Image (cartoon, rainbow, N blue to C red):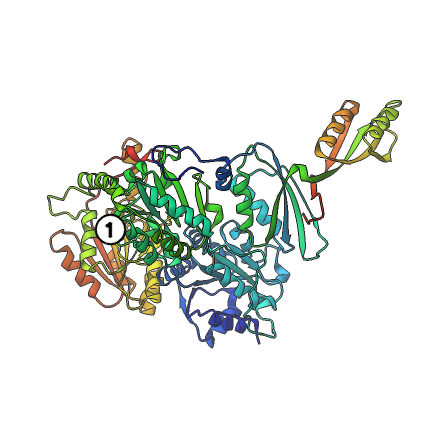
């Protein structure tokens, strides 16, 4: 069988139902195999769009995404999605074409050192050197991408090797001696964690994307409600704990709520589950949670004590560990009344510092209100993807996610242009869900070519552009930290998104008035096919509250 | 041990726990003995990891083991500059890395091979050869105006030898970096 037909068999054996890619010279053989391969291939307009779509698919479904590109520029265009997937622990298999083996190292046409370029940003990568290696390498790639701490992997296949005739045998015994993730969690450590939680007087559960990846939301909720633990989470974990829940403090970090940040500041015990003490969470590291001891549950041992020294480390999959932790906790005698004063303190912050903004008096649309209106118009049930910037923070603050995998954004890398293709991938993975990409007018233009993919393929996404004509977050920082000296942030009134949407074969809508916004959004979202809504919001609004970079939580402003 | 979760202090509980928690800079040189799969790119992965995490490699040696599919990398890292715990944990994440041992100095024999080319004129040759003998080095080549010496030993011994030779006119020096093997019956 041709090696490329074996590739199709491997993909099917891994349960792949769709891939996102773009053909070129070096992966022509693979594309020939797609003709009868029995796998849906979605032709994207730019490899980066395909990579982010595979990420969106993976984040929405929990399955491994697959993205293809050719050699050279095809592979280099995938670099941003690869790094993005690494930073946010997204399982994606990237399969790249490579020039013929005889051309390797000769600066051949469309040759790039894909392995070398991507090496710092992959969980692992495979350079195929013999066609017989292809099936095993692919299965190893899927295994590594999806297990342990998930992440991106690259399989680079030279064109001549992919054309070879191989004796294909299904591979069912993937064994990697150097890769054995610890998933169970040490029982003694878990018991110690349970005891520490039971004696804590000002505990907080600090939850990260690991809980989403592990599918541990139910276990988290059980632990939290066993003893009225306050819960906060990172940007990545929104929805892992239901936002309407009374124990929910709101998001943590730079643009999190005061209640969450102050609680961390005064906590005596922080139980971190699947998060990594990123600088957007900790602010000034030396003043982060100065009174607290730390429990850290993470599947990646290298995260333990990387940024903050941890007292009780537990290495393991969040679902396994939380299940055991709940069992251990049940065995203890708990006096929940010890948390009464702590909750009084938290309620005080909540009452005094709710998320707020000044409502517009002139009928303009406040960006925060746009998110609230979107929440109403979708009954809070949409899968929401975003790009990066002000709109992303407002979405995190005002769209109250109550389930995991409904909030899809680029957290670690902060990739503008992520939202639209990610929405495309999410919609392909979850065809019955309403999928909305909330984008900024700046970032949406970075991958808006994928609207053509959506119209051609009938991928029914709704793109809502929060249009303030600025690179808004950069403008905010220039206003606050650079004396109002605006430099290269004004995007003007370009392009005309309504006409552009129509040019792409989608529906374009423009909304400018606050009155009737919910109904107008509801109508736009109900319109069949891809829709792009250009919502003009007031231009110079800032995201608050805010911990300025390098500052401590208690110095929060706004 | 003290109960965890008492309010009011961020003081760490015990040295043991601190070590378990990592983040401690030990302040001494560490010799890491790493078994890796002999696959293309493995050294790049390790070197790249050190570079992007900001860890400095002091010395690095790579060679085959008795198993053809496995190579051994011995590298030394300054524990005063880097949290060794982070270094080893990050290394462990590399899929081609099979085993890492942070060798205990007291239970380890380390050796380094060095060659020195020294300028010698007239009577100096005999003097240099005498120093060499004291250090149990070997003369491996003699020219009219230079001499090449070879020595094996610990890094300290090599350094001491170098210091002795320098005044004679050291033309160049080559050092292999340390290799290390654990004492006793068990495998390193």
Which chain does the residue under circle 1 lie in? Answer: A
- Give the total number of marks visible in the rendering: 1
User: How many residues crowd around disc 1 within 10 Å: few (fewer than 14), some, or many (20 or more)?
Assistant: many
Most foreground residue, A401 or A246: A246
Q: Is residue A423 left or right of residue B19?
A: left
In this view of the protein, which residue sits in the foreground, A309 or B59? A309
Residue B139 coordinates in the image, percent (x, y): 85, 34
Q: Is the residue A124 above or below the residue A346 in the image?
A: below
The residue at the point 70 percent across, 42 percent down is: B179
Q: Relative to B157, is A379 above or below?
A: below
The outermost residue toward the front is: A333
Q: Quadrant of the C terminus of chain A?
A: top left
Horizontal relation, residue B105 to residue A486: left or right:
right
x and y percent of residue A55 in the render?
40, 58
Point out residue A349 in the picture as x, y percentages from the top left corner.
21, 39
**Viewer-nearest residue: A97 or A382:** A382
The residue lying at 32 percent from left, 53 percent from top is A223
**Position of residue A97 in the picture relative to residue B177 (left or right):** left
- For the N terminus of chain A, which image quadrant? bottom right
Residue found 83% across the figure and 26% down from its top:
B131
Is disc 1 placed on a helix, strand or loop? strand
Instruction: Report the front residue among A190 and A45.
Output: A190
| Residue A470 seen in the current view | yes
Residue A276 visible here: no
Task: Give the residue pinned by disc 1.
Answer: A466
* Left or right side of B187 for A453: left
Residue A483 is situated, as x and y percent measured from the top left of the image, at: 28, 30
């Amino acid at each position: 069988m041709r090696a490329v037909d074996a590739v199709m068999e491997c993909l099917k054996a891994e349960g792949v139902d769709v891939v996102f890619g773009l053909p070129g010279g070096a992966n022509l053989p693979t594309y020939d195999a797609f003709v009868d391969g029995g796998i849906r291939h979605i032709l994207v307009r730019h490899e980066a769009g395909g990579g982010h779509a595979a990420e969106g698919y993976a984040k929405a479904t929990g399955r491994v995404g697959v993205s293809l590109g050719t050699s050279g520029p095809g592979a280099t265009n995938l670099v941003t999605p690869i790094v993005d997937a690494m930073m946010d622990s997204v399982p994606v298999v990237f399969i790249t074409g490579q020039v013929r083996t005889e051309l390797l190292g000769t600066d051949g046409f469309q040759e790039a050192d894909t392995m070398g370029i991507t090496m710092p940003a992959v969980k692992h990568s495979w350079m195929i050197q013999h066609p017989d290696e292809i099936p095993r390498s692919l299965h190893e790639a899927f295994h590594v991408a999806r297990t342990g701490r998930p992440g991106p992997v690259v399989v680079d296949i030279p064109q001549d090797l992919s054309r070879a005739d191989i004796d294909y045998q299904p591979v069912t015994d993937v064994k990697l001696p150097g890769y054995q993730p610890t998933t169970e969690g040490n029982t003694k450590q878990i018991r110690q964690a349970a005891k520490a939680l039971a004696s804590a007087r000002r505990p907080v559960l600090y939850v990260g994307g690991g809980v989403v990846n592990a599918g541990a939301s139910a276990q988290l909720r059980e632990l939290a409600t066993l003893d009225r633990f306050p819960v906060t989470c990172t940007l990545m974990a929104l929805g892992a704990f239901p936002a309407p829940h009374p124990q929910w403090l709101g998001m943590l970090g730079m643009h999190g709520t005061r209640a969450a940040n102050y609680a961390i500041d005064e906590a005596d015990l922080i139980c971190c589950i699947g998060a990594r003490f990123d600088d957007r969470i900790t602010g000034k590291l030396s003043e982060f949670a100065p009174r607290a001891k730390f429990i850290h549950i993470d599947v990646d041992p290298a995260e333990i004590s990387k940024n903050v020294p941890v007292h009780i480390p537990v290495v393991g999959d969040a679902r396994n560990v939380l299940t055991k932790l709940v069992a251990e906790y049940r065995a203890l005698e708990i006096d929940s009344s010890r948390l009464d004063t702590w909750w009084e303190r938290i309620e005080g912050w909540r009452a005094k510092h709710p998320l707020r903004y000044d409502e517009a008096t002139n009928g303009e649309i406040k960006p925060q209100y746009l998110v609230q209106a979107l929440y109403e118009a979708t009954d809070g049930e949409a899968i929401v993807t975003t790009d990066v910037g002000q709109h992303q923070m407002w979405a995190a603050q005002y769209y109250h996610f109550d389930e995991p995998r409904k909030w899809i954004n680029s957290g670690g890398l902060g990739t503008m242009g992520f939202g639209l293709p990610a929405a495309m991938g999410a919609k392909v993975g979850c065809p019955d869900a309403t999928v909305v990409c909330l984008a900024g007018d700046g970032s949406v233009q970075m991958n808006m070519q994928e609207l053509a993919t959506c119209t051609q393929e009938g991928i029914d996404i709704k793109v809502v552009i929060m249009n303030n004509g600025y690179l808004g977050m950069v403008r905010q920082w220039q206003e606050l930290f650079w004396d109002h000296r605006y430099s290269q942030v004004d995007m003007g009134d370009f392009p005309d998104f309504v006409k552009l949407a129509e040019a792409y074969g989608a529906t374009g809508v423009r909304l400018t008035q606050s009155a009737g916004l919910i109904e107008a959004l509801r109508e736009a979202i109900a319109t069949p096919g891809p829709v792009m809504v250009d919502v003009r919001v007031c231009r110079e609004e800032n995201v608050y509250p805010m911990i300025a970079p390098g500052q401590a939580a208690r110095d929060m402003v706004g | 041990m003290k109960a965890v979760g008492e309010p009011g202090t961020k003081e760490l509980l015990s040295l043991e726990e601190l070590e378990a928690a990592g983040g401690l800079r030990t302040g001494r040189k560490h010799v890491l003995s790493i078994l890796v799969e002999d696959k293309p790119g493995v050294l790049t992965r390790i070197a790249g990891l050190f570079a992007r995490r900001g860890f400095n490699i002091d010395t690095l040696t790579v060679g085959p083991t008795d198993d053809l599919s496995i190579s051994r990398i011995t590298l030394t890292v300054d524990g005063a500059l880097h949290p060794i715990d982070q270094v080893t944990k990050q290394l462990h994440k590399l899929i081609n890395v099979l085993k890492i041992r942070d060798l205990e100095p007291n239970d380890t024999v380390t050796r380094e091979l060095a060659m020195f080319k020294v300028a010698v004129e007239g009577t100096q040759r005999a003097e240099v050869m005498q120093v060499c003998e004291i250090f149990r080095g070997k003369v491996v080549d003699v020219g009219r105006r230079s001499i090449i010496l070879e020595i094996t030993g610990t890094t300290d011994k090599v350094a001491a030898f170098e210091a002795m030779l320098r005044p004679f006119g050291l033309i160049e020096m080559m050092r292999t970096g340390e290799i290390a093997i654990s004492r006793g019956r068990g495998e390193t």
